[in-house]
Image: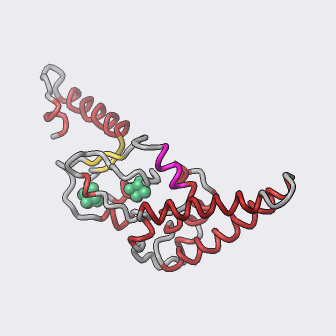
Amino acid sequence: MCGNTCPRGAFFDRILRHFSQGKKIPGFLKDKRFRLSVFFFVFGMFIVQASQSPFTAEHFGHIFWMMCTATTMLAIFLGLFFSRRTWCTFCPVGTFISFVGKDNHSLTIDKNLCVSCRLCEKACPLNINITKDRESGILSDNDCLKCRECVAACPKRALGSLEMREDLFLSKLAEKLDQDSAKTYSHADVWK
Ligand code: SF4
Ligand code: SF4
C-alpha cells in the first residue's frame, strides 16, 4: 500500500523510470533474512543516534533527514541499474507494511483467460512471479504495490481485483440480459 503514497516511490515511477536499465532485481534483496537485517539495522541506527543527544525536534529532524538522504542515494543507485523499484523490495517501511497489510486488496488471476505469456511479470517493477498463483487465482505476494501495471500489460484481461472482477461480471451479465432477458444464465455462461 505504501507504493501508492510514498513520495520516493512516486519519484522512482515518474522520473527514475526514464533512466533505469531495468535489470532483474537480485534475488537476495528479496530474502526475508536480508530484509529483516536491513529493518533492524536502520531502526537500530535511528535509536542509537537519537539517544546520543537531548530529545529535541531539531535533533530528530536532522537524523531523519540524514537517513532519508542516505537511503534515497542508495535507492537511486540501485534503481539506475536494476528495476526502478529495487529499493522497495527491502525498504524497512515496506517490510513492515507487507507484514501488517497481508492479503489486503489482493490481485486476482483468471486461469481460464491467462495464456502464461508473462508480459505482466515483465511490466511488474518488483519482478513479482505473478503466474505462480494462477491456480489459486489470488496473488499471494504481500510486496505487491497494487500499482496495476501488470493489469494494464495483460493482453487477455486476466488480472484484476475482486472488486474489478465483480464489476466486469455484472457488466457482462447486463450485456447478456440485453440480448435475451428471458434466458437463465449460469456463472460460466456469463464469462463465455
Ligand atoms: S500477462 Fe495476462 S495472460 Fe500473460 S501471463 Fe500475465 S496474466 Fe497471464
Ligand atoms: S500490481 Fe502488479 S505490477 Fe504492481 S507490484 Fe503488484 S504484481 Fe507488480
Name the residue nearer the viewer: 5 or 187. 5
Residue 6 relative to residue 106: left or right: right
Residue drawn 47% across the image and 50% down it: 98
| Residue ranking furthest to the top | 182
Residue 126 spot, x, y in % from top left: 43, 63
Residue 149 visible, this orientation: no
Residue 75 spot, x, y in % from top left: 58, 71
Q: Count up the numbered dots.
A: 0
Name the residue nearer the viewer: 50 or 23. 50
Occupied quadrant, residue 169 = top left
Looking at the rendering, the quadrant in which ligand 2 lies is: bottom left
Q: Main secondary structure of the magenta part?
A: helix
Residue 51 relative to residue 70: left or right: right
Q: Which residues are magenta?
A: 94-100
Residue drawn 53% across the image and 51% down it: 96
Quadrant where the C terminus lies?
top left
The answer to whether residue 66 is above or below residue 185 is below
The answer to whether residue 181 is above or below residue 4 is above
Residue 141 spot, x, y in % from top left: 37, 53
Residue drawn 16% across the image and 26% down it: 180
Residue 53 shown in magenta: no
Residue 123 visible, this orientation: yes
Residue drawn 24% across the image and 30% down it: 173
Residue 98 shown in magenta: yes
The answer to whether residue 73 is above or below residue 38 is below
